[in-house]
Amino acid sequence: MSVILGVESSCDETAVAIYTPSLGIIAHEIYSQIDLHQIYGGVVPELASRDHIRKTLPLIQTALECAKLSASAIDAIAYTRGPGLIGALMVGASIAKALAYAWQVPAVGVHHMEAHLMAALLEERAPAYPFLALLVSGGHTQLVQVNDFGSYILLGQSVDDAAGEAFDKTAKLLGLPYPGGPHLARLAKTGNPNTFHFPRPMTDRLSGLNFSFSGLKTHAVHCYQKNGVAAKADIAAAFEEAVIDTLFIKCQRALEQTNLHRLVVVGGVSANEQLRAKLAQLNIEVYFPRKEYCTDNGAMVAFTGYQRFSRGFYDKDQTIQVKPRWEMTEITD
Ligand code: KG4
Ligand code: ZN
């Protein structure tokens, strides 16, 4: 039996989990840096790195205690190699590789977006391959044809802001706290999505499967300047509906184009309730991870580490290498 420790540190969450194939996730610890970055209105990379340094080892210790395991029970250590903030990635990678060296076990570098994708396969109701994946996070908006583990075809992606980034920037503009996505979604519940009309960018057939969300943010700025504070909730509702409709139209189109009948939706924005409800209307099987596995977490890294380790993919030397920019289609071994 393999026992895999997973360490996630790509952005502003320090997260650690332990996975075994027979029992699933047996420990799951997360420390969010929200309070640290709040006053700056966004993630400050240097502060993020320093905080990962403080939190990673204590979280690993807590996870081991929680699973009632000693370090000698760990068979491999998975860590997020990229994409993400270089300093934050370096902290997680250095700690994972140092521990792997000390404990004489392999280290397994994991792709953050592949880990988001695998989060859906952690669920009891898991999708079978092949499927269409919509990856929607703070840094990515992508449609990917997933033929098997490690076999990915990029069908489309955002040409500017990612969906989560657009949520966060629009939320900031409306005076909501960081990270704005969940706050904007909460405010949208109290607004009327029909008071203002927001465009559905790049949904004409010619635009294919790419996305563009930065125009929606600009539209929100103008709408706010013109209508003032009283219109905030209606702007939030119209913005959210425009993003969700756009994602829905593109998913529909990608399903038609690929002839796939299963859709898997992952990444931070997949926690959005309106998005989940809208995509559930598609006449196919739709899969989401549970909400705590939508946003950054250690469980997805531990599980992806297991998938890779069990196929013989792990770091073959001691060098610490991270990849701040890294396409999912370029994952090798
Ligand atoms: O996957 P994630 O935790 O980190 C990245 O890999 O980027 O995604 C974070 C993003 C943020 O932009 C956050 O605002 C957004 O996901 N998000 C949401 C919701 N929950 C998180 N956006 C809209 N509605 C939500 N409920
Ligand atoms: Zn993420």
Image (tube, helix red, strand yellow):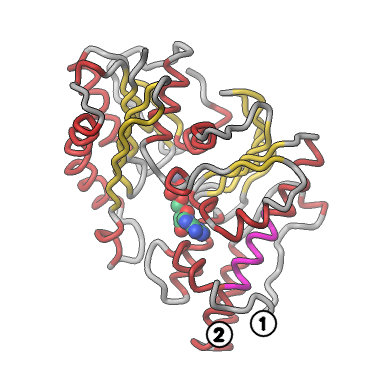
Specify few, some or many for label 1: CA neighbours under 10 Å numbering under 14, 14-19, or 20 or more. few
Instruction: Specify the segment rendered in magenta.
Output: 237-247
Q: Is mark 1 within 8 Å of ligand 1?
A: no
Q: Please state if 145 lies on the left or on the right of 5 as rendered.
A: right
Residue 165 visible (yes or no): no
Disc 2 target residue: 231
Specify few, some or many for label 2: CA neighbours under 10 Å numbering under 14, 14-19, or 20 or more. some
Specify the amino acid type for callout 1. Thr
Residue 106 visible (yes or no): yes
Specify the amino acid type for callout 2. Ala
At horizontal 38% and vertical 64% (from top left) the residue drawn is 178
The answer to whether mark 2 and mark 1 are in CB contact below 8 A is yes
Disc 1 target residue: 195
Residue 177 image point, x, y percent: 37, 69
Residue 138 image point, x, y percent: 48, 52
| Quarter of the figure with residue 91 | top left
Which secondary structure, mark 2? helix
Q: Please state if 22 lies on the left or on the right of 188 as rendered.
A: left
* Residue 246 within the segment the image draws in magenta: yes
Find the distance from the CA under tag 2 to the CA under tag 1.
9 Å
At horizontal 48% and vertical 69% (from top left) the residue drawn is 186
Q: Which one is in front, 20 or 325?
A: 20
* Residue 216 within the segment the image draws in magenta: no
| Quarter of the figure with residue 35 | bottom left
Q: Please identify the dominant SS of the magenta region.
A: helix
Q: Which one is in front, 316 or 108?
A: 108
Where is 204 relative to 308, above or below? below
Residue 21 image point, x, y percent: 42, 20
Where is 271 relative to 27, above or below? below
